[in-house]
Image: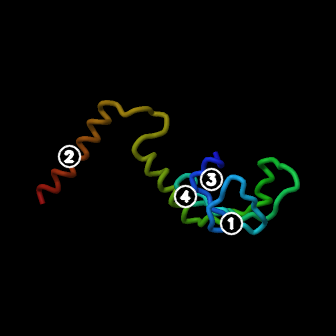
Amino acid sequence: MVTEACKKNHITVNGMVAKPSKEVFPTDKITFRKDQITQIITVLDIPENRVGAKLVDIYRKNETPAEAYAHLELLKLSKEHYRKNGTGRPTKKDRRDIDEFGNEIKEEDEIE
């Protein structure tokens, strides 16, 4: 997954496009896009050996602005407003309601 993102030039290290074989060093800033927000990670240290997922946060610092996460939360809430997850495709009644909603707005505009 990360290799594909590197090949598509979606990941940068210190402002330069990174290849999959790019070595990173402490104080490097890695920028990538995930879940519709741009994430910024700073490398604090490189571990001697492989480490488990719980220990990864010791070696990195997330510098993504809080506004980006707030924007992501708003996007999730706006999607949930229409239909809840797992409810499937809209029914005929749902589609008719959606069509009527669009027509009501157009009719109000024509009256004015």
Q: CA distance from mark 3 to mark 2?
A: 46 Å
Q: Which residue is mark 4?
A: 37
Q: Amino acid at mark 2?
A: Asn
Quick check: 59 above or below 94? below
Q: Amino acid at mark 3?
A: Cys
Q: Residues within 10 Å of mark 3 (few under 14, many from 20)?
A: some
Occupied quadrant, residue 59: bottom right
Number of numbered markers = 4
Q: Residue furthest left?
A: 111
Q: Nearer the viewer, mark 2 or mark 1?
A: 1
Q: Closer to the camera, 8 or 76? A: 8
Q: CA distance from mark 4 to mark 3?
A: 17 Å
Q: Closer to the camera, 4 or 54? A: 4
Q: Residues within 10 Å of mark 4 (few under 14, many from 20)?
A: some
Q: Are marks 2 and 4 in contact (CB under 8 Å)?
A: no
Q: Amino acid at mark 4?
A: Ile
Q: Residues within 10 Å of mark 2 (few under 14, many from 20)?
A: few
